[in-house]
């Protein structure tokens, strides 16, 4: 058993968690249908250290700001919420300061808020416990924080960020897929988007029978994509990305900017392309065997394009 002295010596704790991409099934996953997500090689790092005063201090190196909050106050900040829930779970009798240092672009659909919440939960849970928390404990704390960021999150962002790899997710079920590591080109439209608002817009139309048909078609695309990923069949994965995009467009969550970049990538020979995450703006993704070429054509069309590697590690201690 650890003594109190060796427990104190674990202060500070740094945890990191990856960015994510939804490869298939965004939006329908909110209604209990499946989706597939993968963890990327861009991470958010959070260092937690105890404070003698019972308060929460959140410092963001990226934003260059500092927030101070109490253990119980109502908050609109997901990181403060993650800290509050983790402190409550560990019955902490000290305060905490967390410092965020993230490589993940914010508000573009790459799961930046989930990554920071997961890394914060992991760092604080370990700081105030004698044993390492389980991934399920970390995910449960981060899910509370995500409710502030997204309203009614399906849980897929916190699940992929916690477990890493590539997962087939349905509410309550997480299947780790032995999927290949792929290079994917991400094209940021630079148009800001609001996940909460877009998810609410979809909710307004989801009861319409024509939309329900759309939902079931995407669901079957996701299941076929699971098989294609397990067989590493890039042509089929790309074809299914194009199909998923057709139905996302019909759901009203695409945009002119996203459509332009998707078409440019498809015409330049990508296996497939689609929006990722909530849509409305943010990022599109393209699967290709020539990532530099696709990155280049997207940049020429005014996107901010970069190449990411899929299937990376989930939350971990540094
Ligand atoms: C956001 O990354 C994905 C959505 O499906 C919302 C959710 O799953 O909570 C749009």
Image (spheres, helix red, strand yellow):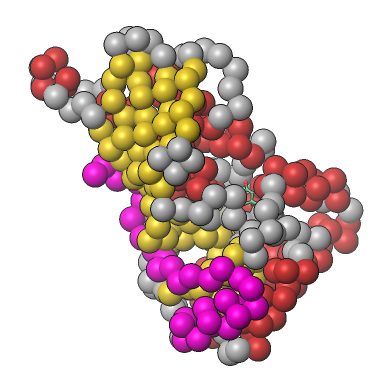
Q: Nearer the viewer, residue 262 or 129?
A: 262
Above or below 95: residue 273: below
Above or below 75: residue 255: below
Per the rendered image, the range of residues in magenta is 290-318
Drawn side of residue 247 relative to residue 116, left or right: right
Instruction: Give the residue drawn at x 35%, y 21%.
Output: 96
Instruction: Give the residue drawn at x 23%, y 29%.
Output: 12
Does residue 44 appear anywhere in the picture?
A: yes
Residue 218 on the magenta span:
no
Does residue 217 appear anywhere in the picture?
A: no
Q: In which quarter of the image is residue 307?
A: bottom left
Q: Where is residue 203 in the image (x, y as percent from the top left)?
A: 79, 46
Q: Which of 301 and 224 is in front in this view?
A: 301
Instruction: Give the residue drawn at x 40%, y 40%.
Output: 61
Drawn side of residue 293 relative to residue 45, left or right: right
Drawn side of residue 90 relative to residue 308, left or right: left
Q: Which of 132 and 13 is in front in this view?
A: 13
Instruction: Give the residue drawn at x 81%, y 60%.
Output: 252
Q: How many labels does the image show?
A: 0
Q: Where is residue 75 in the image (x, y as percent from the top left)?
A: 58, 22
Name the image quarter holding the C terminus: top left
Above or below 217: residue 294: below
Q: Position of residue 123 (x, y in %)?
A: 32, 33
Q: Position of residue 1 (x, y in %)?
A: 11, 21
């Amino acid at each position: 058993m650890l003594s109190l002295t060796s427990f104190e010596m674990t202060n500070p704790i740094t945890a990191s968690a990856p960015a994510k991409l939804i490869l298939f099934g965004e939006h329908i996953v909110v209604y209990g249908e499946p989706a597939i997500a993968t963890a990327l090689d861009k991470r958010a790092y959070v260092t937690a250290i105890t404070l003698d005063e019972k308060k929460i201090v959140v410092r963001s190196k990226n934003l260059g700001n500092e927030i101070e909050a109490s253990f119980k106050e109502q908050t609109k900040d997901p990181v403060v919420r993650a800290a509050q829930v983790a402190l409550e779970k560990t019955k902490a009798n000290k305060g905490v300061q967390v410092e965020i240092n993230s490589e993940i672009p914010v508000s573009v659909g790459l799961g930046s808020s989930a990554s920071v919440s997961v890394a914060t939960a992991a760092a604080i849970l370990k700081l105030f416990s004698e044993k390492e928390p389980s991934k399920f404990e970390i995910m449960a704390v981060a899910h509370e924080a995500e409710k502030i960021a997204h309203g009614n999150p399906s849980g897929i962002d916190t699940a992929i960020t916690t477990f890493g790899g590539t997962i087939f997710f349905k509410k309550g079920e997480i299947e780790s897929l032995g999927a290949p590591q792929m290079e994917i080109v991400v094209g940021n439209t630079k148009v800001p988007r609001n996940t909460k608002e877009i998810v609410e817009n979809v909710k307004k139309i989801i009861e319409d029978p024509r939309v329900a048909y759309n939902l079931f078609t995407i669901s079957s695309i996701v299941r076929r994509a699971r098989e294609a990923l397990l067989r590493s069949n890039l042509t089929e994965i790309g074809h299914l990305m194009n199909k998923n995009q057709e139905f996302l467009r019909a759901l009203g969550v695409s945009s002119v900017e996203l459509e332009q970049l998707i078409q440019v990538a498809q015409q330049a020979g990508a296996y497939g392309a689609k929006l990722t995450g909530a849509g409305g703006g943010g990022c599109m993704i393209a699967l290709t065997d020539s990532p530099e070429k696709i990155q280049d054509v997207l940049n020429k069309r005014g996107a901010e394009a970069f190449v990411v590697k899929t299937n990376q590690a989930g939350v971990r201690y540094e």
